[in-house]
Image (tube, rainbow, N blue to C red):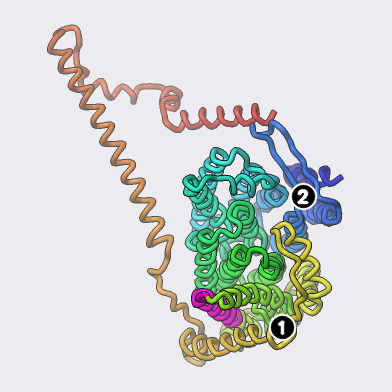
Amino acid sequence: MAQGLMLFLILFPMAMAPVVFPLRRRDRGLRDRFIQLVPLAELAAALVLLFLPAAALTLPGVCGLGLHFTAGSLGRLLAAVAAVLWVGTGAVSPPYFASAEGCNRYYFFWLLTQGALMGVFLAGDLFTLFVFFEMMSFTSYVWVAQNETPQALRAAETYLAVAVIGGMTLLVGLLWLGHLLGSLEFARLPELAAAVAAEDRWELYGAGACCLVGFGAKAGMFPLHIWLPKAHPVAPAPASALLSGILTKSGVFGVLIVSRFLFWADVPWNRVILVLGTVTMALGAVLALFSIDLKRTLACSSMSQIGFILVGVAMQGYLDGENALAAWGTVLHMLNHSLIKLVLFVAAGVVYVNTHTLDLNAIRGWGRNRLWLKGTFFVAAASIAGVPGFSGYVSKTLLHEGIVEYIHLLEHEGLSAAPFQAVEWIFLISGGLTATYMTKLFVAIFASPRAVGQRIGVREYMSSWTQAVLCCGAAILLGLGVTPGRTMEPIARWAAAFLAADEGHAVHYFTWVNLKGSCISLGIGAAVYLLVVRQLLMKQEGSERVYVDRWPAWADLEDRVYRPVLRGLAFTGALFARILASLGDLVVLVGERILFTKAPGIFVPKRNEDFGVYGRKPRRFLVEETFSFDLLLSGLGLVILLIYILI
């Protein structure tokens, strides 16, 4: 039964995707009900799969190497979380797109992406994971470009470039690993990696680095985070909830696979993950603090929270046999962040639909009397800030305890713990900045006086479906937060078995020793809000205090580094090709001169007018001689080859 459910979770939404087109032509309401029912069927299947024993499924010959699936505990949990997010976004999408056109395209790729993401989480080897990972990257590209504005198309271009470059780098890493180890199955990787000779260890690190680039690009890890702050503001709010809430987790899932099965307790590898995670955590928080765009702030917040999770991944490796708390914190923060971002981005969608802007100065005070929106937004904001009593506090406490445990371990052995003490303080400060920018958003939208000229809006500012999603999401976050021992800890124990976590011990979350870390972060957040946000990031304009974006315009990694580098590479390639072409012309010219000299009257050089003959050729002949026509034939051949392989 588990095998059938795995196939259902992957293939059902893909099979249903084309149905949206005929349904829309018949009745838009029927189409809307359809895209709400399909995710419900997926959720039911995912929940049933949670309670079944682990199972494996192999489809031999598909894509040449065959596809392998396994229902691991962590993969099943993430599949269920993904199904919950699709149910939520499916419920709010019809009212969000009520006055929009071109929704069929969005829904089509929305369902394709769900099936591809299920394939990622249920993959049993790295090749299968790669196939669905790339499929997911290309189908979700359409979400970013959906609105087709210049900003959306540019952000989609960045998203696609990062996805393609990351995917090709990942493919190199997988081919390298396949050659080095002989297999890409998760279950065999630890044994094969341990058997690699010391002199070949550099190859394992090289292949792992390529995989880290590919997975880290999707996760939003520094320095491959450039797509994240740009894609979310321009994508529809339901798409942003998925991009931030669960698609980034596919990248984290890949990093976890590589770290867990190839580099378990490997100090150099874990050092790299820790450094990248710490930088991602702190930089994302700083970017969110400076932003004055609602969805951009939430996007940078996602980058920061991914950094928290990566720190947890690294600490698992450092702690080795005593990694339970770090593993629990990693799993639970992935769960919490997904649910939190569902609530926050759906709330952002409500604000945007009513105000048609995301600028904090324009939406200032809009939610003052909207109690349901204010309450649900507050629950999600408090959760991501790590306020005790909300779900995010539990996962952040566990991650913090993982760092503290390793510091105590080093001190017990008489070793210097200074680097990890620095990581702990960056962790606490980043948590404080999270509280700062979420306070900034809450105050701006729900507590500040209304902006001058702002439209009051209609009384029914959100649909009943949207209200239900927000309330259910907030209730789950609050329920998990107040009952961590009965709800969150059992989930963490079960899912973290996939990460080889030890049994661990009971954690008393609301004792002072654990509350202290949260209090330090919240104190830092309050100080930064009063001294930085209110004093430096706001200014007086007439009778109003407005938010200003003081982040330097030149500090854009994409515009200052990546695009110039790519343009330089393109110029170098074109120059090299031109030099080779010139050398070829020179060889031909020299050959002609020799032939003309040796055989006069037999070889006659072409005159200038002979080169104008192309203008007199029919259009069909011209098309058949173009490079585009060659590419078209190549693409057609590739499609035929893929169909042959799949059959």
For disc 1, the marked residue is 388
Q: Residue 124: which disc?
A: none
Quarter assignment of residue 300: bottom right
Question: Mark 2: which secondary structure?
Answer: loop
Q: Is residue 244 a member of the stretch shown in magenta? A: no
- In the foreground, 491 or 369: 491
Position of the C terminus, as image quadrant, is: top right
For disc 2, the marked residue is 71
Q: Amino acid at mark 1?
A: Pro
> Residue placed at 68% from the left, 35% from the top?
66
**In the displayed structure, does residue 373 sit left or right of residue 259?**
right
Q: Of the two numbered discs 2 and 1 on the same chain, state the one appearing first in sequence.
A: 2
Can residue 299 be seen here? The reply is no
Q: CA distance from mark 2 to mark 1?
A: 33 Å
Q: Position of residue 319 (x, y in %)?
A: 62, 67
Quarter assignment of residue 456: bottom right
Query: Tags 2 and 1 in contact by the CB under 8 Å rule?
Result: no
> Residue placed at 62% from the left, 40% from the top?
183
Does residue 477 sit above or below 581 in this rendering?
A: below
> Residue placed at 44% from the left, 75% from the top?
551
- In the foreground, 434 or 261: 261
Q: Is residue 431 a member of the stretch shown in magenta? A: yes
Position of the N terminus, as image quadrant, is: top right
Give the residues in magenta.
415-437
Between circles 2 and 1, the one closer to the viewer is 2
Q: Position of residue 341 (x, y in %)?
A: 67, 68
Classed neighbour count for the residue bearing mark 2: other residues with Cα under 10 Å, few (<14), some (14–19), many (≥20): many
